[in-house]
Image (tube, rainbow, N blue to C red):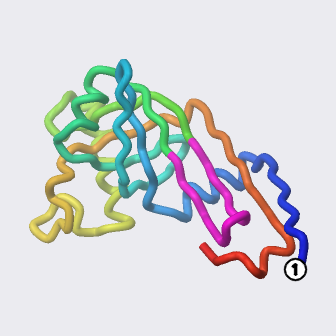
Amino acid sequence: MTAISVRTGALDRPFMETMLGRHHVARIAFAFHDRIVLSLVNYVYASDWVYARIEAGSGLTTVQHRQWAALAVDEIDGVYDWRSVTVHGSVQLLAADEAAGASSEFAKALALLRTVVPAVFTADDPTPERAQILRLHVNEIVGTESRSTGTDQLPQA
């Protein structure tokens, strides 16, 4: 049996941004008092902002009271071989019927989301219940990776 060796380390900013850009599914967490709401979201990353949609429910209710959130994206190759990026920042809820400045942010967000799923907010929208667009500013970004050797006897991810 080969000994397993594991090394962990930090990811650099360009790699973290590339990783955020190549994925479109993440976990987002909203916290208020002693409750944390964690949800899977589809998202798009562009210019220090993460754009996503959520549905009515505990996540939306929580972010309406406290605009801070965290978002995490992972790439997992094996038990000890993975990369993880976590973003912390403030959330803004976007609506089409707000003032001209906010409306243009909504249009920009919608256009970005449609680069991944063109049917967003159309009659063919696969998740019409996700009626609220939000954007999360990347105030802080942290990335970690783990690499291993000698793990051929362990299960794959």
As drawn, which residue projects farthest toward the front? 1
**Residue nearest the viewer, comparing 113 with 150:** 150
Q: Is residue 82 magenta?
A: yes
Which residue in the protein does label 1 denote?
1
137 to 11, vertically: above or below? above
Q: Main secondary structure of the magenta part?
A: strand
Q: Is residue 122 magenta?
A: no
Q: Residue at x 29, y 53 (%)?
A: 110
Q: Position of residue 20 (x, y in %)?
A: 56, 55
Q: Quadrant of residue 112?
A: bottom left
91 relative position to 100: left or right: right
Q: Position of residue 39 (x, y in %)?
A: 35, 48
Q: How many numbered markers are drawn?
A: 1
Q: Residue at x 38, y 67 (%)?
A: 116
Q: Quadrant of the N terminus?
A: bottom right
Q: Position of residue 81 (x, y in %)?
A: 72, 65
- Magenta range is 72-86
63 relative position to 77: left or right: left
Amino acid at circle 1:
Met
79 to 156, vertically: above or below? above
7 to 150, vertically: above or below? above
As drawn, which residue projects farthest toward the left? 123
Q: Quadrant of the C terminus?
A: bottom right
Is label 1 in a helix, a strand or a loop? Answer: loop
